Amino acid sequence: MSEQLHPDIEFVLLSEKQIRGIVQDLGAQISKDYEGKSPLFVSVLRGGFVFTADLMRAVTVPCSVDFMAVSSYGDGVKSSGVVQIVKDISTKIEGRHVIIVEDILDTGLTLKYLIGLLEGRHPASVAVATFAVKDIPGCTPAIEPAYVGTHVPNEFVVGYGLDYAERYRNLPFVGVLKPEVYS
Ligand code: IMP
């Protein structure tokens, strides 16, 4: 898909090539940090599935994956602060090293809730890998992830798993949506 041609995209923020580099770096870091361990990736659906698939393939230690579906935004562009577990993992995590994999950290409220939930199940450790952190002037996210792929400006971004109203997740790049699409 050509990066220039999508009519709803204002501009491309991260190209496919840049994304590949970011994920390779994170995979190498995680492989080093978890040497001798076998982490479980908990992918946060729906946005995290594309990043999770790439990240797992960039990791060289033995690892497994499970999925959790949460709903925090509905179809809008503003955080509601309300996290609803739509689907839970089925893996028993007691004594396991868990890495929660998220697409983008905005307020951090979704992840704060998930960390608390999973820590209550007595894993050996819980870390967070987020593809992006949204930089919002004057706002500090509720949690600090161990692994951050990149930072993005305070814009509504789509692609590489990120949606607006369930669309654009399939774009291979991350782009800023034209405001007229959601206003
Ligand atoms: P938080 O709880 O405010 O950190 O919200 C995080 C979740 O909101 C992410 O997992 C996304 O699903 C969604 N989100 C936040 N910013 C964006 C964006 O710019 N585009 C698409 N989804 C977003």
Image (spheres, rainbow, N blue to C red):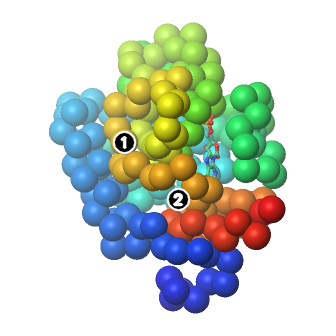
Check contact, mark 2 vs mark 1: CB within 8 A. no
Q: In the drawing, does residue 24 fall left or right of residue 7?
A: left
Q: Circle 2 — which element?
A: helix
Q: Nearer the viewer, residue 119 or 80?
A: 80
Please name the amino acid that badge 2 sits on.
Answer: Val
Please name the amino acid that badge 1 sits on.
Answer: Val
List x then y, in percent, for residue 121: 56, 13
List x then y, in percent, for residue 98: 43, 28
List x then y, in percent, for residue 169: 63, 65
Q: Residue sitting at 76 percent across and 70 percent down? A: 180
Q: Nearer the viewer, mark 2 or mark 1?
A: 1
Q: Nearer the viewer, residue 53 or 164?
A: 164
Q: Earlier in the sequence, mark 2 or mark 1?
A: 2
How far apart in space, not on screen, are marks 2 and 1 (Cα)? 16 Å
Decide if residue 114 is in sight here: no
Q: Nearer the viewer, residue 65 or 143?
A: 143
Tag 1: Cα neighbours inside 10 Å, few (<14), some, or many (≥20)?
some
Residue 77 vs 9, above or below: the answer is above
Q: Residue sitting at 61 percent across and 75 percent down? A: 9
Q: Residue sitting at 50 percent across and 45 percent down? A: 134
Tag 2: Cα neighbours inside 10 Å, few (<14), some, or many (≥20)?
many
Q: Residue sitting at 76 percent across and 34 percent down? A: 80
Callout 2: CB less than 8 Å from ligand 1: no
Tag shown at residue 50: 2
Residue 125 vs 181, above or below: the answer is above
Residue 66 vs 6, above or below: the answer is above
Residue under label 1: 148
List x then y, in percent, for residue 157: 58, 59
Q: Circle 1 — which element?
A: strand
Give the quadrant of residue 18.
bottom left
